[in-house]
Image (spheres, rainbow, N blue to C red):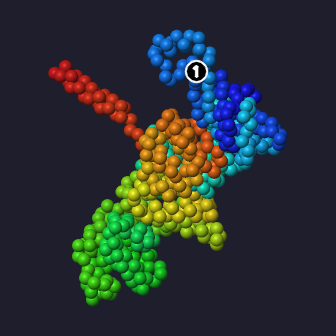
Amino acid sequence: MKQIGVCIGSTKPNRISFITDGIVRIGQFVVLHYRDEDGEKRLLGMIQSLERNNPYLPEDIKSRQQAESLKKFSEKENAIRGEVHILGEIVDTGDEVFLQIPRTPPLPASAVYEAEPELLKKVFGAKSKRFVRIGRLLSEREEVPVYIDIEQVVLRHLAVLAVTGAGKSNTVSVLLKNIVNLGGTVAVFDFHGEYAKTRLTRNGRSVINHITPLINPASLKPREFASFIGIKPNATVQFRYFRIAFEHLIEELKGEKGDDWQSHIKTDIFLSRLKETIEALSDPESDVGQKIKGKVRDDSLFEVLNKLEDLETELGHIIKLGVPPLIENIKPGMVNVFDFSELDEEVADAIASNILRWALEERKKAVRQGSSRLPFPLMIVIEEAHILAGEKRNTESKYYIARIAREGRKFGLGITVVTQRPKGLDKEILSQMNNMIILKLVEPEDQKHVQRASESLSQELMDYLPGLNPGEAIIIGNMTKIPLLVKIDRAAEKIEGNDIDVIGQWEEILSSEKSRADDVFSKLENL
């Protein structure tokens, strides 16, 4: 190993200061080597901060001329000082290298060595089939692959956070490719139609299963259906009228046709009878009207009817009585894409909450009873997660996302939230994401929101975020055990972002105009 410095000053079990006359880099891995009464010790650390100092050029120097004259004879007096965060004591069993928490501070004046690539490859390499490659260490000259525990990604959840253009789509592509190569199953809530265009494959065959969100209104809970037609959570009177009418109609149909009533009635008839039932609420003599206490508010009743009619007009093509729950369309070993690109936020919330609810219930059945519509572990990727799990929005999806974040690991159900607006994401849900891949974040409020949600994100790591280049990320959490600066691999089969080729489209307009002008001149010349 090449010695690059010496430990100076007082030491702590997790931090030391050092001095060097060589060139070192922030994020570089180093090894402290010393002997104490317990024998030889080797500690792995990462350089967190650096500063270069010349004792002959203090900050209170009087003039530029004085600085220039001192510079001539003190150029070789420069020294680099820095801080190293101790990651752990290196334990080499021969078959495996792992880190254990040091219990005592290292000795002052200990030698600081450059970490050898072979050591780093053993520490950050694949330890079992659960580990998949995500990228390489950012600050090492020689390529050192970084592997993450994909099982921990599913069981302990993941947040992918970055500004637009920082590499979120590529990062998610790398993750999904690794998961489906292991035979894993993913469901994606796609708000921009990006996943439908991707060409993720396994053994040369597409692994994208595009699912059109056909909704069975009878499979929705009253709150979900109310949200689906646009009744806001704070519209309590509208919701009460809708719930009473909806539940009354279901009971009535079961009485008429039996439990298999859905096979005996068409969707348009069901919706028509639902409107009739809602209208009947205003009649205190009707069966459903007798369930209302007090005088019916006509304005609220008409608002519910209007919303239901708008639903038929705008979303009638995705409503179909009798269709099975959407989760039954999920195919194992594939990336199952629920396309929300043509839906507004309220409708997307109603559909997403329904999928999340069914997924949690069916995974519980799979574990506890052995029989389920979802007999395999599932990871749900939520793009634009701030829409469904916003800090200031109470959505139905937010409730189920939080439940899955708390309970999902017991049932093999994982959540990955992806957003370019971390400050807009509910902090309780973000704090449940025990793994994070954080690419470039510039806005201070975004950085603070993320730091408040993660105990592993130190201020030193936070300082890197604004300066990260596209594809560079900080990875923290159970999937790596220690925070890492990583260059994410380039996905060969990348999910396409939704950026528009502005210049290309402008050039097409110019080309089209020039072509028309040429045609006009050509016709004039032939006259």
In x, y percent, where is residue 367? 64, 68
Report the residue at 72% width, 42% height from top.
105
**The C terminus sits in image quarter:** top left
In x, y percent, where is residue 475? 58, 44
Report the residue at 21% width, 26% height from top.
520
Q: Quadrant of residue 307?
A: bottom left
Q: Quadrant of residue 89?
A: top right
Q: Give above or below for 398 relative to 273.
A: above
Q: Is residue 135 left or right of residue 38?
A: left
In x, y percent, where is residue 515? 28, 27
Q: What crowding class fits label 1: few (fewer than 14 Cα within 10 Å), some (14-19), or many (20 or more)? A: some
The amino acid beneath tag 1 is: Asn
Q: Is residue 37 left or right of residue 493?
A: right
Closer to us: 507 or 476: 476
Q: Is residue 496 visible?
A: no
Closer to us: 60 or 250: 60
Closer to us: 423 or 273: 423
Q: Is residue 247 visible?
A: yes
Report the residue at 34% width, 78% height from top.
245
Q: Give above or below for 147 relative to 380.
A: above
Report the residue at 52% width, 67% height from top.
358
Q: Which residue is mark 1?
A: 54
In x, y percent, where is residue 405? 55, 60
Q: Give above or below for 173 relative to 302.
A: above
Q: Give above or below for 418 relative to 29.
A: below
**The N terminus sits in image quarter:** top right
